[in-house]
Image (cartoon, helix red, strand yellow):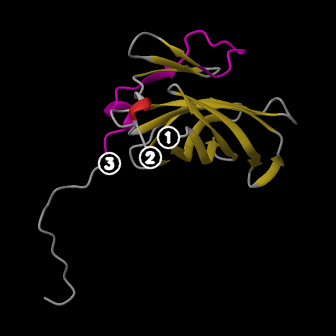
C-alpha cells in the first residue's frame, strides 16, 4: 500500500469550546449604551467583575492573581472569542497577545489587531500593569488602515481587562479606539485570549 495514509480513528476534528463558554464569561451589547462611558472594570460582587466599553458589557469571574507566580504568554487561538462594532461595521476578527509577569505585575509585548467590516484594520502595541487583579494598559503604538492604506497613526486607545480561570487560563480584554485625525472612525468591543 504505497502512498496510502491510514488513520486509526474516524473521529471528526472539531473546534474547541469557546473560552467565554468554558470559563462562564457572559457578554453582550448594552441595552442603553452610554457614549461617554469609556472602559471600566468594576467589582459586581464577591466573585464577579463587570468589564465595559462604550457599547458592550461583560461579567467575569476573576482569577485571584495574588497567588500566581512566574510569567505567562497569552495569544489568540482556536478557543478565542470577540464581540464588537465600529463606524465601519461589525468587528470581523480580533488578534491579540501579551506577556505578563505575575511577580512584578508587568505586562509587555502587547499587541491588538481589530478588523472591522472588510476593509478597516486597527493595529496597536501596548504595555501595562497588573495590580490587585485589575489590568491597566496603555497603547505604545497605533495605526488605522483603510483598504490597505494607512490613514492615521493618531489612535486614542482605552484598553484593559481581567484574567479569568483557576490558573489565569485566559485574559478577557476590552478596547475603545478612536481616530484623533477623524473622529468618525471608532471601534469598541471585548475579546478573549488564552495561555
- Give the structural element (helix, strand or loop) at label 2: loop
Name the side, left or right, on which 95 lies relative to 159: left
Dots 3, 1 in contact, CB < 8 A: no
- Percent across and percent down for residue 28 are 49, 21
Which of 108 and 61 lies nearest the eye of the viewer? 108
- Check if mark 2's residue and mark 1's residue have beta carbons within 8 Å: yes
Comparing labels 3 and 1, the label whose residue is closer to the camera: 1
Pointer 2: residues within 10 angstroms few (<14), some, or many (20+)?
Answer: few
Toward the viewer: 65 or 104? 104
Label 3: which secondary element: loop
Q: Quadrant of residue 54?
A: top right
Tell me if residue 19 is in the magenta stretch. yes
Residue 103 marker: 1
Label 3 vs label 2, nearer the camera: 2
Q: Measure the C-alpha gap from mark 2 to mark 1.
A: 6 Å
Give the residue drawn at x 51%, y 35%.
191
Label 2 belongs to which residue? 70
Q: CA distance from mark 3 to mark 1?
A: 33 Å
Quickly name the residue at label 3.
Answer: 15
Asked if residue 150 lies left or right of residue 67, the reply is: right
Q: Which residues are magenta?
A: 15-40
Q: Quadrant of the N terminus?
A: bottom left
Give the percent coordinates (x, y) of residue 60.
Answer: 43, 23
Pointer 3 or 1: first along the chain = 3
Q: Nearer the viewer, residue 181 or 170?
A: 170
**Relative to 106, 58 lies left or right:** left
In reply to whether residue 4 is colored magenta, the answer given is no
Amino acid at each position: 500500500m504505497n502512498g496510502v495514509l491510514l488513520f486509526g480513528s474516524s473521529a471528526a476534528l472539531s473546534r474547541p469550546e469557546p473560552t467565554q463558554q468554558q470559563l462562564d464569561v457572559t457578554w453582550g451589547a448594552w441595552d442603553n449604551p452610554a457614549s461617554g462611558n469609556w472602559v471600566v472594570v468594576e467589582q459586581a460582587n464577591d466573585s464577579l467583575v463587570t468589564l465595559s466599553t462604550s457599547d458592550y458589557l461583560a461579567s467575569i469571574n476573576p482569577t485571584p492573581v495574588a497567588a500566581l507566580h512566574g510569567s505567562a504568554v497569552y495569544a489568540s487561538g482556536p478557543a478565542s472569542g470577540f464581540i464588537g462594532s465600529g463606524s465601519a461595521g461589525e468587528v470581523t476578527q480580533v488578534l491579540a497577545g501579551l506577556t505578563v509577569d505575575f511577580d512584578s505585575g508587568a505586562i509587555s509585548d502587547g499587541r491588538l489587531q481589530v478588523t472591522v467590516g472588510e476593509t478597516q484594520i486597527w493595529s496597536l502595541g501596548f504595555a501595562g500593569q497588573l495590580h490587585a487583579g485589575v489590568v491597566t494598559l496603555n497603547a505604545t503604538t497605533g495605526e488605522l488602515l483603510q483598504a490597505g492604506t494607512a490613514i492615521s497613526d493618531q489612535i486614542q486607545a482605552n484598553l484593559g481587562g481581567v484574567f479569568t480561570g483557576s490558573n489565569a487560563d485566559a485574559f478577557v480584554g476590552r478596547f475603545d479606539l478612536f481616530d484623533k485625525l477623524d473622529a468618525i472612525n471608532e471601534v469598541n468591543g471585548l475579546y478573549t485570549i488564552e495561555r
